Amino acid sequence: MEAETETGSRISKMRRSLEDNARQNLDLLRRAQQHNLQTFRQQPLQEISGSFGDLGTLLPILIAYTDAHRYSGPAIDLSSTLVFTGVFNIITGTVFGIPLPVQPMKAIAAIALSSSFNENDVASAGLFVAAVVGFLSITGLLEWFNRRIPVPVIKGIQVGVGLSLVIYGGSIFGKRDDFDYEYPGLVNILQVFAFVGLLASNTYRKIPLALILLFIGFLFALPDLIRYSVSFGIWQPHALLPQSWEFQRGIDAGLGQVPLTVLNSIIAVTALSADLLPELPAPSPTALGLSVTAMNLLGCWFGSVPVCHGSGGLAAQYRFGARSGASIIFLGLIKFVLGLFAGPLTERVFRSIPNAILGIMVIAAGLELANVGETLNSMEARDHPKVENGTTTMALGQGLSNPHAENSVIPDWRRRRWTTMLITVGGILAFKNTVVGFLAGMLCHWSYELHDRNVSWRSRREGTIRLGEDEARGQESNNA
């Protein structure tokens, strides 16, 4: 009888806990909708402008995916990508109430574009990352994973992947295409204009370079649209079933994406949201992880590009005026309509864009990703040494060159981190493999830690020996 009473009490507590959580979630959802509506009514133009802030990253990779193997078939289904990412935009804008981006996974894109991946390979990579991130989210291991991977290795992966995109973009920037034969002089002018535009956008950050280049590309695509009589078409979804060897290729590409997703798409987004929008509740790492998992488990089976959230995209949309999820909902509606009714037309436009424009857009996306390396040793780094009252303290797991040489700590710390990042970048570029770069960076980091532990052990041992000698001398003095 007592056991039944205790069991009933536990069930009642669990029911009340679930009800409380449900009420809290509904309250957060209601607040998000109120914020979305109020913000859009107050500043509709800023919200619409901000919704396109992340297109500089989204469009180049989608175009490159679609046009990467124009004779053997694209690596993704563009219509499915537009439909699913549009739906994901609408859902994330509704649930989180912040301008949370939905952007392609860059590490997977770099490998897929340079290694001739097909749709099944790309889908396998997205599904693998979704499975790993989902496991880390459910088990609460995201924070542990973040602590164990040193910042220089993460920065090295970001810089290496960004430079891989730059190299790929440069390889197709000067590649001859149909426009070289039809308009040889005009294509050269276009190349110069695109390059100058890229340089100008580094100084004048509000220049919508991607939209300008896309508009010019659309003008170049008009003859093809007329020639091939491309019309609107209803989206026709198709399911993918990757084979075992395709899953193996996908796992190889996805391994390098996991740390990028965990840190850039989850941990960094949580912190950045709290900084930019302190009046709104920041999404938790677990919620973001489950969001990434759900998006890829739903979309990748239908040829959609593997996607995640990103701190760079959030910052870009905030910079161009977005302050709520309404901006992302607006963008999602546009993408959904294009994918549902104008997939063939959009794909033909993307395929007809000159290589000069496509190359410079990929270069711009790669440079944006590689730029994160500049904060490696700055005060903005989350593990930067803190000097308080003349004492230098460092983040756990980052190593300390010489705890007895206070003045040499920070310079040596910076050199080590720079070396670790460069080794990671070198491994990625030399072997065209993110996993190799990741392992090389980790081995470099571990070698420094092993050296520090050896120095610390020797210091303690020498101290013990000196202490023993002092005690022996003291006893001899007493006996004398």
Image (spheres, helix red, strand yellow):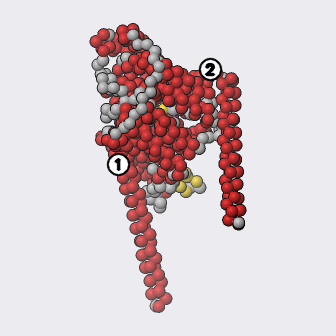
* Rendered residue at 43%/25% (across/down): 78
- What is the three-letter code of the residue carrying label 1? Ala
To which residue does mark 2 refer? 45
Marks 2/1 in contact by CB < 8 Å: the verdict is no
Q: Secondary structure at mark 1?
A: helix
Q: CA distance from mark 2 to mark 1?
A: 47 Å
- Please, which residue is most extreme toward the front here? 1
* Residue 260, placed above or below residue 181: below
* Residue 110, placed above or below residue 267: above
Figure disc tally: 2
Q: Position of residue 437 (x, y in %)?
A: 35, 45
Q: Position of residue 138 (x, y in %)?
A: 53, 49
Task: Tell which of 348 and 98 is nearer to you.
Answer: 348
* Rendered residue at 50%/29% (across/down): 85
Residue 334 visible within the image: yes
To which residue does mark 1 refer? 440
- N-term mark: 2 or 1: 2
Task: Tell which of 390 and 344 is nearer to you.
Answer: 344
* Rendered residue at 62%/27% (across/down): 326
Question: Quadrant where the N terminus lies?
Answer: bottom right
Q: Position of residue 448 (x, y in %)?
A: 39, 55
